[in-house]
């Protein structure tokens, strides 16, 4: 009886540990809330100030409709300052924005259809380019396909946090939002916090811990099934 009790306690501890790991790796979810305000529109991306004060970046699927002033509106109808009067659903989960930066950078490399690497005052960054983005180079509109090395680009960069960001990062106060300058570009944080180092936000750590828990659970089950007279 004592052995069975100890095994049950061990199984309970392992299950609790596994659930704790799952919770710790739970993705940060965000919504616009019942009302929100348009901050930026660039290509098929939309930046909103949600009803809870968070700054959110949405990718917008074709045909998406919004409610503004009691009327249905498309992405093309939205302008900075537009008040949205219904929850926003674009077909993609929004990302929380941790910082906004207005920059002038030199094109280091362009990777159509959706990435450009800029040389900035604080280093080289690979940025996501929303579909439909137009760059103004020397007064002429250009697409990402037209960009060449050493071209100068004006941009407003929004940095989004990782899905597994720590609560203090996800719940931090929204950054200031200067007027849009140049093209809207997105810098995606890959791991926890503000770092852009290779993704610590993958599920590999979670799978590893769960695997160890399952192995230990299997060992406990084998012990329970072992004949009591066997050494």
Image (cartoon, grey):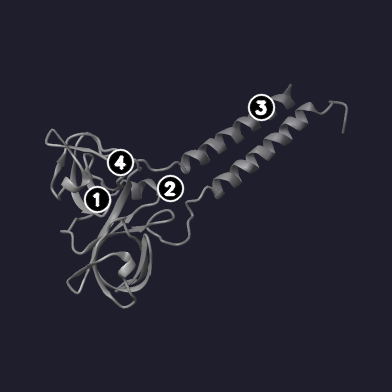
User: Reading the chain from its start, which is encountered first: label 2 or label 4?
Assistant: 4
Distance from the alpha carbon under mark 3 to that under mark 4:
47 Å
Q: Which residue is mark 4?
A: 90
* Relative image position of residue 152 (x, y in whole percent): 26, 74
Eye-nearest disc, 3 or 4: 4
Which quadrant holds the C terminus?
A: top right
Helix, strand or loop at label 3? It is helix
Q: Is residue 82 left or right of 148 when viewed as pictured?
A: left
Q: Which residue is mark 3?
A: 8
Q: Which residue corresponds to mark 2? A: 164
| Marks 4, 1: nearer the viewer | 4
- The residue tagged with tag 4: helix, strand or loop? loop
* Disc 3 crowd, CA 10 A, few/some/many (<14, 14-19, 20+): some
N-term-proximal mark, 4 vs 1: 4
Do the residues under discs 4 and 1 have CB atoms within 8 angstroms?
Answer: no
Q: For the residue carrying disc 4, how many other residues have a C-alpha within 10 Å: few (<14), some (14-19), or many (20+)?
A: some
Q: Earlier in the sequence, mark 1 or mark 2?
A: 2
Contact flag, marks 2 and 3 (Cβ < 8 Å): no
Give the Cα distance between marks 1 and 2.
Answer: 18 Å
């Amino acid at each position: 009886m004592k052995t069975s009790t100890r095994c049950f306690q061990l199984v309970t501890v392992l299950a609790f540990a596994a659930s704790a790991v799952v919770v710790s790796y739970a993705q940060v979810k965000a919504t616009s809330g019942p009302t929100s305000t348009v901050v930026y529109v660039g290509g098929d991306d939309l930046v909103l100030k949600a009803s809870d004060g968070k700054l959110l970046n949405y990718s917008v699927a074709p045909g998406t409709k919004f409610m503004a002033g009691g009327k249905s509106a498309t992405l093309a109808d939205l302008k900075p300052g537009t008040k949205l009067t219904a929850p926003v659903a674009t077909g993609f989960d929004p990302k929380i924005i941790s910082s906004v930066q207005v920059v002038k950078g030199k094109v280091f490399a362009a990777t159509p259809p959706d990435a450009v690497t800029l040389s900035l005052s604080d280093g080289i960054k690979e940025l996501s380019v929303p579909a439909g983005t137009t760059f103004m180079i020397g007064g002429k509109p250009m697409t990402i396909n037209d960009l060449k090395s050493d071209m100068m680009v004006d941009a407003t960069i929004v940095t989004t946090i990782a899905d597994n960001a720590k609560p203090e990062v996800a719940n931090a106060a929204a950054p200031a939002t200067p007027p849009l300058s140049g093209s809207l570009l997105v810098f995606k944080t890959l791991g926890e916090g503000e770092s852009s180092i290779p993704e610590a936000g993958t599920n590999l750590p979670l799978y590893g811990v769960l695997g160890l828990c399952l192995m230990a659970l299997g060992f406990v089950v084998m012990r329970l099934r072992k004949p009591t007279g066997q050494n």
